[in-house]
Image (cartoon, helix red, strand yellow):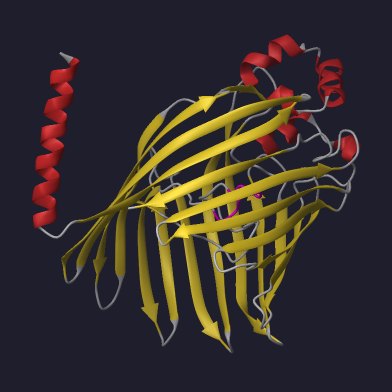
């Protein structure tokens, strides 16, 4: 029965694809495998996934287009984790002593399992007009000028160890209205169950004296997870931000800042500035400083809630001041060698990650990355296990 069902689905998909290709629908995508060895609690464990992404696009008319992609990913190796395995024991013991909540009582609330997934990543239509561009559906919403961090971005979660990896689409209505020679206004509505819980964002962007400048206001109802047995609560967050990017004295420079007004918890600011430069021989260097008022200056004040937030999708760092830097150099025709470092300037822990990229051909790339942490006990990265990943991606 299942085989018959699969054959029917295959037949329908083939028929739809053939019809779509006849109407100008373009198909592309990639296959990706990532092998991720990592040291956890002194033991080396293996993780691995296979991923297929199918991209579709079509210019339906002069003023209307469609884009979308569907992802399917299977996880292998170790797929069950608990946040407590990554948190210093002294932090867990202190929490238990202060609250009377045992470690065993906490474990069920901090467990994570990676299950095979398939989902519609992006699917949107774009309507073009002389006076505006309207995009409707699940779409990419890039926000901010920062490389490793983006204080003004309320839509995307960012992995500081792989900040350029593709983001998950956001279901939203987005309108852009141009004005002047190089300016525009944009508004975004990401729908929730009502207006109050929906995410709203507005941006005004212009180009002035060689710099791209923008200001942003956004409002979001976000889930907050206090470390207790009482579950989550929702808090309204209003953010006022700005960013800039351009060239100064031959350097590429950028900056980004945001102040967050919170309904229940403390207001806080985050900001960054960075620069990069490419030498004639191909050597590229980059550096970025980040300040985060959500963080703590003393590692002894890192609470269990801070660690859980670091390990969650929010991935907010524990400290207040950070420096990211690195270099990239083409060591051969098909090889690129990079070295990057991320340092917590408050507890002086960090991670060094060498990065090698190799192009097998125009459609295949290999990436090898290592993670080498350093720092004292109970610092942000000091107890982070050594590891890395190997990734192959084949485009079609």
**Image spot of residue 124 (x, y percent):** 29, 53
Residue at image position (53%, 56%) is: 218
Front residue (pair 308, 42)? 42
Q: Is residue 60 above or below residue 235?
A: below
Classify residue 355 as left or right of residue 200.
right
Front residue (pair 232, 271)? 271
Residue 277 in sight here: yes
> What residue span does the magenta drawing correspond to?
158-164
The main secondary structure of the magenta stretch is loop
Asked whether residue 81 is drawn in magenta, I would say no
Classify residue 53 as left or right of residue 146.
left
Residue at image position (65%, 42%) is: 315
Residue 111 in sight here: no
- Residue 74 position by quadrant: top left
**Image spot of residue 396 (x, y percent):** 32, 53
Residue at image position (15%, 21%) is: 5
Classify residue 335 as left or right of residue 396.
right
- Residue 225 position by quadrant: top right
Front residue (pair 72, 154)? 72
Q: Is residue 332 above or below residue 120?
A: below
Q: Is residue 124 above or below residue 119?
A: below
Classify residue 66 as left or right of residue 108.
left
**Image spot of residue 365 (x, y percent):** 49, 54
């Amino acid at each position: 029965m299942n085989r018959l069902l699969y054959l029917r689905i295959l037949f329908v998909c083939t028929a739809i694809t053939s019809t779509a290709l006849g109407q100008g629908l373009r198909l592309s995508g990639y296959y990706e495998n990532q092998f991720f060895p990592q040291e956890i609690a002194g033991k080396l464990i293996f993780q691995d996934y296979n991923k297929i992404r199918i991209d579709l696009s079509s210019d339906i008319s002069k003023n209307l287009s469609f884009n979308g992609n569907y992802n399917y990913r299977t996880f292998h190796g170790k797929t069950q984790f608990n946040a407590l395995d990554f948190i210093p024991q002294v932090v867990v013991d202190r929490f238990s002593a202060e609250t009377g909540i045992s470690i065993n009582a906490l474990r069920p609330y901090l467990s994570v399992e990676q299950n095979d997934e398939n989902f519609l990543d992006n699917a949107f239509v774009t309507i073009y007009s002389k006076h505006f561009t309207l995009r409707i559906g699940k779409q990419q919403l890039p926000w901010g000028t920062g490389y490793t961090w983006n204080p003004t971005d309320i839509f995307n979660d960012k992995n500081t160890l792989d900040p350029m990896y593709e983001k998950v689409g956001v279901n939203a209505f987005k309108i852009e209205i141009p004005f002047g020679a190089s300016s525009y206004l944009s508004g975004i509505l990401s729908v929730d169950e009502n207006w109050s819980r929906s995410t709203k964002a507005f941006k005004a962007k212009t180009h002035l004296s060689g710099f791209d400048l923008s200001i942003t206001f956004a409002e979001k109802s976000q889930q907050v997870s206090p470390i207790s047995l009482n579950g989550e609560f929702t808090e309204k967050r209003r953010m006022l931000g700005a960013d800039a990017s351009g060239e100064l004295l031959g350097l590429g420079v950028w900056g980004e800042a945001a102040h967050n007004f919170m309904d229940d918890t403390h207001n806080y600011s985050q900001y960054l500035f960075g620069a990069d430069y490419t030498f004639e021989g191909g050597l590229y260097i980059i550096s970025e400083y980040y300040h985060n008022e959500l963080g703590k200056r003393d590692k002894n004040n890192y609470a269990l809630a801070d660690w859980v937030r670091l390990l969650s999708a929010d991935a907010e760092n524990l400290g207040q001041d950070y420096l990211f830097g690195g270099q990239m150099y083409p060591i051969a025709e098909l090889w690129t060698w990079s070295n990057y470092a991320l340092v917590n300037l408050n507890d002086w822990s960090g991670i060094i990650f060498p990065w090698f990229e190799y192009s097998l051909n125009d459609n295949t790339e290999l990436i090898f990355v290592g993670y080498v942490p350093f720092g004292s006990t109970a610092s942000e990265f000091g107890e982070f296990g050594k590891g890395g990943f190997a990734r192959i991606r084949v485009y079609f």
